[in-house]
Image (cartoon, coloured by chain):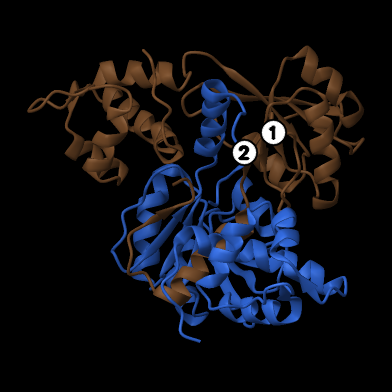
Chain colours: A brown, B blue
Amino acid sequence: MAEAKIPKATAKRLPIYYRYLNILFNAGKQRVSSTELSEAVQVDSATIRRDFSYFGALGKRGYGYDVENLLNFFKKTLNQDHLTNVALIGVGNLGHALLNYNFRQTNSVRISAAFDINEAIANTIQSGVPVYPMAEMKEQLQIQQVDVAILTVPIEDAQIVADELVDAGVKGIMNFTPIRVSVPATVRVQNVDLANELQTLIYFLDHYGSETTNNSATE
Amino acid sequence: MAEAKIPKATAKRLPIYYRYLNILFNAGKQRVSSTELSEAVQVDSATIRRDFSYFGALGKRGYGYDVENLLNFFKKTLNQDHLTNVALIGVGNLGHALLNYNFRQTNSVRISAAFDINEAIANTIQSGVPVYPMAEMKEQLQIQQVDVAILTVPIEDAQIVADELVDAGVKGIMNFTPIRVSVPATVRVQNVDLANELQTLIYFLDHYGSETTNNSATE
């Protein structure tokens, strides 16, 4: 199916739709209306219909959406039909938590290798994931053909390691460090700045109370 | 100063501006142009000028912005001049990492209490933060006048605990669980869905390559 270039906000909602469709499917549900879906995912039904419209008319008026069809469609769109291996750079407190984090809710993403400069942890297996010394990062990323990395190194190492990742051919970086790393235009960076998220929440509470509807970092 | 109601995207950039202004100020810099600021924070200078315009004209043509004035202004706007105490609910792997996470880059936010049902960890101090049993959550939140909580409990407990937080008077929840919790309109939820962030990064790489500029979860 030819896809129109979809808005980022829509793309970010796709995994949410996918997750709930999985739940519905596993519960034996065969069809779902946009209103039902709306309540479950807390996105208004007009937005849901608009989001779905980017992918062609998937629903029928008066019937709603066929759960299995929709699920299979999203599975393909989100590449849930193949496994993406991801590397984790920096096995500190946050890195360790991410090794244990359930990224595999839909079995399509897996941290397959981790890297750390700490010699006490390098060459061990942590939470089922091999931890290699930093000196082997470039070689291992290339051998394992990993092109997405999660960056959880100390702030002062962030740019150096980002440069090394780019050099190793990594195309996407999920950056948990609070600095904005510089990368070539050929590399995509997704910043996850937890202090900023918390500060923004507090800012909105202080300034506007809680008068508006729920926010999402992913919207 | 009377503030116009500012867009969420602008509010989310304020902590980023603030952080870099701090760095500039500590380096002894007295003024900064929107172009310089733009390069440092990777936000285009037109956006910076528009963001700042919501707060009144803070810069002068041909001079740029006075670093100290701007810093003091943001400090007030972001309530950096007082400490906000935050609670953490659920001291598992991610919760533990967050106890060690440097939310205090600007000394204005602190996790002051944590809660867990695990009796082995309750009534101990972890990373400098007291961990109370869940049974004491409501009482402690009220005594300590905490109205912002970070939710890092298992998915199956998320809604129950969110209900308890609301009952205890919490006004803001930073939700790290993958489900969308239901709360009254008087409570603000900031969802941080790490699996979704990673999946979105991979989705964009697979579909569009890395042709566009950097993304941020906080935009």
Q: Is residue A128 left or right of residue B168?
A: right
Q: Residue A105: x percent and y percent?
A: 48, 29
Q: Residue A154: x percent and y percent?
A: 81, 49
Q: Quadrant of residue A65?
A: top left
Mark 2 belongs to chain: B
- Compute the Cα span from label 2 to label 1: 6 Å
Sort mark 1 into few (<14), some (14-19) or many (20+) by Cα contacts within 10 Å.
few
Q: Is residue A96 left or right of residue B29?
A: left
In this view of the protein, which residue sits in the foreground, B76 or B166? B76
In this view of the protein, which residue sits in the foreground, B151 or B47? B47
Q: Is the C-beta separation of discs 2 and 1 under 8 Å?
A: yes
Residue under the point 42% across and 36% down: A7
Q: Is residue B123 visible?
A: no
- Dot 2: element: loop
Q: Quadrant of residue A213?
A: bottom left
Q: Is residue B148 left or right of residue B64?
A: left
In this view of the protein, which residue sits in the foreground, A111 or B81? B81
Identify whether A124 is placed above or below B58: above
Mark 2 is on which residue type?
A: Thr
The label on residue A17 is: none
Mark 1 belongs to chain: A
Read off the residue under disc 1: A185
In this view of the protein, which residue sits in the foreground, B68 or A152? B68
Residue under the point 85% across and 51% down: A156
Q: Quadrant of residue B187?
A: bottom left
Mark 1 is on which residue type?
A: Ala
Read off the residue under disc 2: B213
Q: Residue furthest left?
A: A62
- Dot 1: element: loop
Q: Residue furthest bottom?
A: B1
